[in-house]
Image: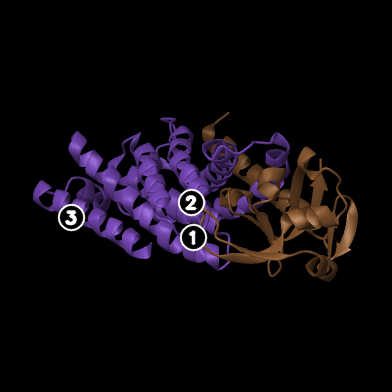
């Protein structure tokens, strides 16, 4: 698959993720619902799994996380922008690590494997991203980091990650039920359709984020 | 061992860890009382704190406008001598805690509605909701 086609896919899915984080994520945060866990389990992991299913390319999700994290950072509303941006940026990297094994092919999984991998992905992506942001946010803000504070928050992280795990366990089987030919039709669409559509949707996402600010 | 056997076991283990952590966090939360706040090892009534300390409105770098009781007044009210020589660990009912220095305490307020400590100079990650105790360390 051509590099430009993949790059357009990274920008498209990263922008969709960023828009969802800035809109739905902030709404859930303001409602006092487990915004981080729901967004990671359903939206972040969901979009990364969809893009892996459509393109089947490793490394794309790392780029998606960086774009979504950047968009979250420049959107000055809602929860902790810096902590969320750092966590989202790393979520892509954690996804890549979990799904790096060639034994984990999304197309050849039993129902139990789909649910289990969804649970593991949601749980690990959320909890690791949360811990990383607890360390890096104070450093980025030139504030002190206390290991005792991080240790104290771990039970809360492991508790909330259950929601992300359950969300991932629901999201992955649903995503993998998309027929393979539909996925390849998107990835291999004619360039006259693919590029304008990808860039137009990305641009709409950025405009949406600016309007939400 | 086959991947198909290991992966479900890991998933179940993670969900069990999450369940036990939830039980632990919930039991920690029960230690708090809605009318009282523990500062420097002593329990104070919230009303008592409000009467003794001054209020301030702040505009944090992280956005929004918040009004609450000055955190530095609360520390002084609790009887801490030479407050600039200590650090302050702010603990929420769910176990979430953040440790800050006196400089940040001077930029912090205690918002009564959510029992939340808000700092004007620190990221939102440092804000602690449903505060049950402020430890002097």
**Chain B pictured colour:** brown
* Image coords of residue A134 (percent x, y): 60, 41
Judge whether B37 appears above or below B83 on screen: below
Q: Which residue is mark 3?
A: A197
For residue A58, what is the image quadrant? top left
Which class describes the residues within 10 Å of circle 3: few (<14), some (14-19), or many (20+)? some
Which class describes the residues within 10 Å of circle 2: few (<14), some (14-19), or many (20+)? many
Residue positioned 74% across, 53% down in the render: B72
Drawn side of residue B12 relative to residue A2, left or right = right
Mark 3 or 1 closer to N-term? 1
- Are tags 3 and 2 found on a single chain? yes
For the residues bearing labels 1 and 2, Cβ distance under 8 angstroms: yes
Drawn side of residue A141 relative to residue B43, left or right = left
Spatial CA span between label 3 and label 2: 29 Å
Of residues A132 and A40, the one drawn nearer to the viewer in this rendering: A132
Spatial CA span between label 1 and label 2: 7 Å
Q: Nearer the viewer, mark 3 or mark 2?
A: 2
Please state, as top left, top right, bottom left or bottom right, where the C terminus of chain A lies in the image.
Answer: bottom left
Instruction: Specify the label residue A81 is tagged with.
Output: 2
- Are tags 3 and 1 found on a single chain? yes
Residue positioned 29% across, 43% down in the render: A10
Of residues A2 and A127, the one drawn nearer to the viewer in this rendering: A127
Q: Which residue is mark 1?
A: A78
Drawn side of residue A100 relative to residue A32, left or right = left
Spatial CA span between label 3 and label 1: 29 Å
Please state, as top left, top right, bottom left or bottom right, where the N terminus of chain A lies in the image.
Answer: top left
The chain to which mark 1 is attached is A
Residue positioned 55% across, 48% down in the render: A119
Q: Could you say which chain is coloured purple in the image? A: A
């Amino acid at each position: 698959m051509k590099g430009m086609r993949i790059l357009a896919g990274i920008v498209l899915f990263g922008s969709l993720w960023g828009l969802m984080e800035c809109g739905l994520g902030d709404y859930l945060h303001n409602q006092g619902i487990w915004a981080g866990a729901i967004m990671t389990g359903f939206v972040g992991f969901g979009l990364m799994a969809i893009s892996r299913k459509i393109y089947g390319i490793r490394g794309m999700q790392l780029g998606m996380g960086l774009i979504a994290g950047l968009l979250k950072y420049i959107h000055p509303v809602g929860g902790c922008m810096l902590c969320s941006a750092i966590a989202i940026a790393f979520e892509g990297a954690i996804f890549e690590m979990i799904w790096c094994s060639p034994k984990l092919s999304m197309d050849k999984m039993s129902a139990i494997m789909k649910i289990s991998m969804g649970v593991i992905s949601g749980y690990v992506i959320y909890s690791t991203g949360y811990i990383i942001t607890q360390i890096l946010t104070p450093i980025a803000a030139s504030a002190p980091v206390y290991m005792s504070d991080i240790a104290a928050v771990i039970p809360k992280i492991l508790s909330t990650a259950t929601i992300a795990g359950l969300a991932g366990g629901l999201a992955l089987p649903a995503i993998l039920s998309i027929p393979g030919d539909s996925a390849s039709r998107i990835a291999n669409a004619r360039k006259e359709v693919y590029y304008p559509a990808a860039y137009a949707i990305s641009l709409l996402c950025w405009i949406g984020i600016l309007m939400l600010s | 061992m086959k991947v198909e056997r290991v992966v479900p076991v890991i998933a179940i283990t993670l969900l069990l860890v999450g369940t036990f952590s939830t039980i632990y966090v919930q039991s920690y939360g029960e230690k708090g009382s809605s009318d009282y706040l523990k500062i420097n090892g002593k329990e104070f009534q919230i009303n008592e704190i409000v009467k003794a300390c001054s209020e301030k409105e702040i505009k944090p770098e992280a956005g929004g406008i918040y009004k609450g009781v000055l955190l530095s007044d609360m520390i002084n009210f609790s009887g801490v001598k030479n407050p600039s020589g200590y650090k302050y660990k702010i603990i929420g009912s769910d176990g979430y805690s953040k440790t800050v220095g006196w400089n940040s305490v001077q930029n912090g307020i205690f918002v009564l509605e959510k029992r939340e400590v808000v700092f004007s100079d620190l990221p939102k990650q440092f804000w602690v909701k449903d505060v049950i105790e402020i430890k002097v360390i």
